[in-house]
Structure formats: structure tokens, C-alpha cells
């Protein structure tokens, strides 16, 4: 099943609905989501949560599916078409022109024209698309209550993402979660600092005053894992389907969940245990 985008005004329980505008990629993911039901490393999960004093969240994936209603493939295509409109079709290779990932286009231009006005304009185009995507973003199941529970028990939260911090703030404001995230570190003009570079993780650690071993990174991509490993931060993988789990495990992630529900349960158990006489 595919979750219905809830928009920014919704604060009630998430509901499930197959959307009429699902792309072939979304349908494939939905099939995987419906059949994939495994949580690996329960003991390791509880140990990770028990040590965490700070939790660093990737945004698109663990918190929400940003492009659920505003296809990432269409955004990537829009960036390519904008470059072609500038007479720069030859700037990209075939695989880069056909990508479903807008960041592939952005990184390609960064490699060939780092620090250029062209790159600044292209990044701003991507940011605008991300801001438009916020209204149809799909909250990740159990993310909202997990975020609120962790914040309520005194664990400090930060976002460390390759998305625009403007889009992140807009989404969190709309979900009533902004107060839970005093620290948001996202894409800047220095695109070479995107994950897998650990720059945004270092910023979050410095802001929270946490040592790497006191933190936990939640991410859904190999670059999330690589950034956490470089920074020395323990990592919890979130994989909503088998394809994403395979990529995380190939990157080296050992503790992976397909749902945030067991994470929420573990946080609640930890809080009850801490409050026991």
C-alpha cells in the first residue's frame, strides 16, 4: 500500500490509501513495502537507543517522503530541461540527463562548474521544487510520534540532510514539529560538503555539544551511513523496502529497520525503565 500524502495541516494518525498518480517507481516500492516485514538486530536496536543522547535525522526518508506527490524524477527532468534552455545540454552525460535523482544533476554541474553562478541558480531551482513538494510530502509512518516522544524525554534532535534547510523548516512547521528540532543543517552553496561528507553531522554534533558516540544517526541511504561512519556516529538504517535495505547493507549498515514502530516502542520502554523506582 501507499500512504496518502497528509499535507502540512494534519496532526492525526496517518492513513493508508493508494494514490491515483502513483508512478511506476512508487508502485514498485509499494509492492515491496507490502511484502517486506522484517526488523533486524532487535538487541542492537535497543543498545543504540539506550546510548543515544542526541539523534541526527536524515530528512527525506526517515522523516517523510518529500517527493511522494511531486516526483523526484520530474524534478530531475525539470533541472535538465532548465540547463538545456541555457544551451548547456552537452554539460551532462546521458546517464545524468536520464536520472531520477535531482542531486545527480546538481553534483554533475558542481563537478564541472564549482562555485559558479550557474550552479547557484540550479541549486535555487531545486530548492523551489523542494518547497513545492512539501505540501504533498508523505509523513513516514510513526515518525511524528517518535520525534515527539524522543524530544519529550530530553533527547536532543537535529536534522542533517542533503535537502534544503528551507524545505525542511517548512515541512516541520506544517507538522507542528519545529520545536522538536532546534538544529537543522542542510544543503548549502558548498555542494562538495553534501553527504557522504560528514560536514552536516559535525555541525549538529558541535551545536548539541555531543561526542560522536553519544549520538545516533537515522538514515536511509548509503551516503547517510558513510557520513555517519566517517564522523564516528552510530547508525540506524531505515529501509522501507528490500531494495533500500540491500543498498544499506552493502554499504555496511548492520542495524536496519523497515518501520519506525519498533524504534518508538524501544524509546517508550527505555523511558518507562528510567522512570521505574
Image (spheres, rainbow, N blue to C red):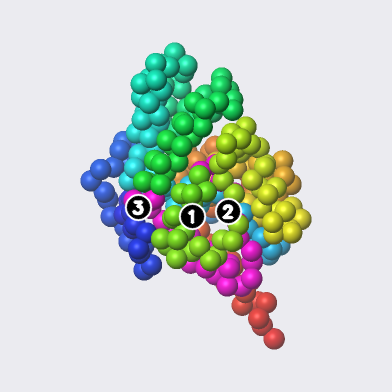
Contact, mark 3 vs mark 1 (Cβ under 8 Å): no
> Is residue 55 found left or right of 71 in the rendered image?
right
Rendered residue at 51%/43% (across/down): 163
User: Which of the 4 image quarters holds residue 227?
Assistant: top right
> Which is nearer the N-term, disc 3 or disc 1?
3
Image-based side of 168 in relation to 202, left or right? left
Q: Position of residue 8 (x, y in %)?
A: 37, 59
Residue at the front extreme? 117
Q: Earlier in the sequence, mark 2 or mark 1?
A: 1
Residue that label 1 marks: 169
Picture quarter with the C terminus: bottom right
Q: Dot 3: what SS?
A: helix
Q: Give the residues in magenta.
A: 134-163
Q: Tag on residue 135?
A: 3
Q: Which structural element holds mark 1?
A: helix
Disc 2 from disc 1: Cα separation: 8 Å
Question: Which residue, as the protein is rendered here, is positioned at the far left?
Answer: 20
Q: Are marks 2 and 1 in contact (CB under 8 Å)?
A: yes
User: Residue 80: x, y in percent?
Assistant: 40, 25
Identify which residue is drawn at 56% across, 41% down.
187
- Residue 120 vs residue 56, the one in the foreground: 120
Q: Real-space Cα distance between discs 3 and 2?
A: 19 Å
Please name the residue that numbered disc 2 is placed on: 184
Q: Position of residue 198 (x, y in %)?
A: 67, 41
Taking the magenta stretch, the answer to whether it contains residue 120 is: no
Amino acid at each position: 500500500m501507499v500512504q496518502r500524502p497528509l499535507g502540512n495541516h494534519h496532526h492525526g494518525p496517518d492513513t493508508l490509501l493508494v494514490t491515483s498518480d502513483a508512478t511506476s517507481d512508487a508502485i514498485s516500492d509499494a509492492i515491496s513495502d507490502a511484502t517486506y516485514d522484517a526488523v533486524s538486530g532487535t538487541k542492537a536496536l535497543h543498545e543504540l537507543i539506550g546510548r543515544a543522547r542526541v539523534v541526527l535525522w536524515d530528512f527525506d526518508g526517515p522523516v517523510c517522503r518529500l517527493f511522494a506527490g511531486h516526483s523526484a524524477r520530474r524534478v530531475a527532468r525539470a533541472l535538465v530541461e532548465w540547463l538545456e534552455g541555457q544551451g548547456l545540454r552537452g554539460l551532462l552525460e546521458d546517464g545524468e540527463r536520464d536520472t531520477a535523482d535531482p542531486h545527480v544533476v546538481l553534483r554533475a554541474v558542481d563537478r564541472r562548474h564549482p562555485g559558479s553562478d550557474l550552479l547557484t541558480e540550479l541549486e535555487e531551482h531545486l530548492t523551489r521544487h523542494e518547497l513545492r513538494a512539501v505540501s504533498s510530502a508523505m509523513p513516514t509512518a510513526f515518525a511524528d510520534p517518535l520525534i515527539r516522544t524522543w524530544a519529550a524525554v530530553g533527547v536532543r534532535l537535529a536534522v542533517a540532510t542533503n535537502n534544503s534547510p528551507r524545505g525542511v523548516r517548512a515541512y516541520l512547521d506544517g507538522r507542528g514539529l519545529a520545536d522538536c528540532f532546534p538544529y537543522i543543517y542542510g544543503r548549502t552553496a558548498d555542494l562538495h560538503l553534501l553527504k557522504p561528507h560528514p560536514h552536516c553531522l559535525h555541525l549538529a554534533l558541535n551545536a548539541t555539544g555531543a561526542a560522536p558516540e553519544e549520538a545516533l544517526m537515522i538514515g536511509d541511504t548509503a551516503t547517510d551511513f558513510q557520513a555517519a561512519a566517517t564522523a564516528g556516529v552510530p547508525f540506524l538504517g531505515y529501509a522501507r523496502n528490500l531494495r533500500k535495505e540491500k543498498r544499506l547493507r552493502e554499504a555496511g549498515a548492520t542495524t536496519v529497520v523497515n518501520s519506525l514502530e519498533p524504534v518508538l516502542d524501544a524509546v517508550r520502554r527505555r523511558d518507562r525503565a528510567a522512570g521505574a523506582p
